[in-house]
């Protein structure tokens, strides 16, 4: 069996620990609903799915979303959408995909990028993603003429 064919599937507790160690310790939405800490959000969604009340968008993965940086409604924010493999109660971080979007307070996109084919070792930390989403200010402020004019 080839090394790339061997996938390491992990349970919810292990995935939550791996991601928490990398700084993802905030609140999440699973499949657009079920707000809460990662473990609670995913558990609530899986319970709804089991009871036939909801279903994932994709048959082989779950979509999680969180804010990497949120400083209030009137400030820039950085959102992270994570797609992680899911099958038979186990998670697969080896095919994880991240979409990072930095928006201004009006919702306009300032920067957006995507990371694919991640695994638990290459999964970036929250701080690395925040640094990657930094937008350099290219506008130069005009210098005001100081002094009196007559």
Image (spheres, helix red, strand yellow):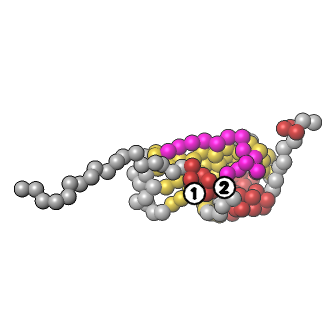
Most extreme residue toward the right is 1
Q: Quadrant of the C terminus?
A: bottom left
Residue 9 versus residue 14 in the image, above or below = above
Magenta residues, start to end: 111-124
Nearest-to-viewer mark from 1 and 2:
2
Rate crowding at label 2 as few (under 14), some (14 to 19) or many (20 or more) other CA atoms within 10 Å.
Answer: some
Element type where label 2 sits in the image? loop
Toward the top, the furthest residue is: 2
Left or right position of 133 against 56 = left
The residue positioned 10% from the left and 56% from the top of the image is 149
Outermost residue to the front: 147
User: Looking at this rendering, what residue extends furthest in the left direction?
Assistant: 150
Disc 1 secondary structure class: strand
Name the residue at 40% across, 60% down.
74
- Examine the rendering and report whether any part of residue 33 can be seen: no
Locate residue 33, reporting x and y percent: 60, 55
Q: Position of residue 133 (x, y in %)?
A: 54, 49
Tag on residue 29?
none
Residue occupied by mark 2: 125
User: Magenta includes 47?
Assistant: no
Q: Is residue 143 above or below residue 57?
A: below
Inspect this view and state whether residue 137 appears: yes
Q: Marks 1 and 2, how far apart in space?
A: 10 Å
Residue 68's tag is 1
In this rendering, position of residue 49 left or right of residue 137: right
Looking at the image, is mark 1 or mark 2 earlier in the sequence? 1
Q: Is residue 121 magenta?
A: yes
Mark 1 in CB contact with mark 2 (< 8 angstroms): no
**Residue at the image position 43 percent from the left and 51 percent from the top:** 104
Q: Residues within 10 Å of mark 1 (few under 14, many from 20)?
A: many
Q: What residue sits 41% from the left and 54% below the top?
A: 105
């Amino acid at each position: 069996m080839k090394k790339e064919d061997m996938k390491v599937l992990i349970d919810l507790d292990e995935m939550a620990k791996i991601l928490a160690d990398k700084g993802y310790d905030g609140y999440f939405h699973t499949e657009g609903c079920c707000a809460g800490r990662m473990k609670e959000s995913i558990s609530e969604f899986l319970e709804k799915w089991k009871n036939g009340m909801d279903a994932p968008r994709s048959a082989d993965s779950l979509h999680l979303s969180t804010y990497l940086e949120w400083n209030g409604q009137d400030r820039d924010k950085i959102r992270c959408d994570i797609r992680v493999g899911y099958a038979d109660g186990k998670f697969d971080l080896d095919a994880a995909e991240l979409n990072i979007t930095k928006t201004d307070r009006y919702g306009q996109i300032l920067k957006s990028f995507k990371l694919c084919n991640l695994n638990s070792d290459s999964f970036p930390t929250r701080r690395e993603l925040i640094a990657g989403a930094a937008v350099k200010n290219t506008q130069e402020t005009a210098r005001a003429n100081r002094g009196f004019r007559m």
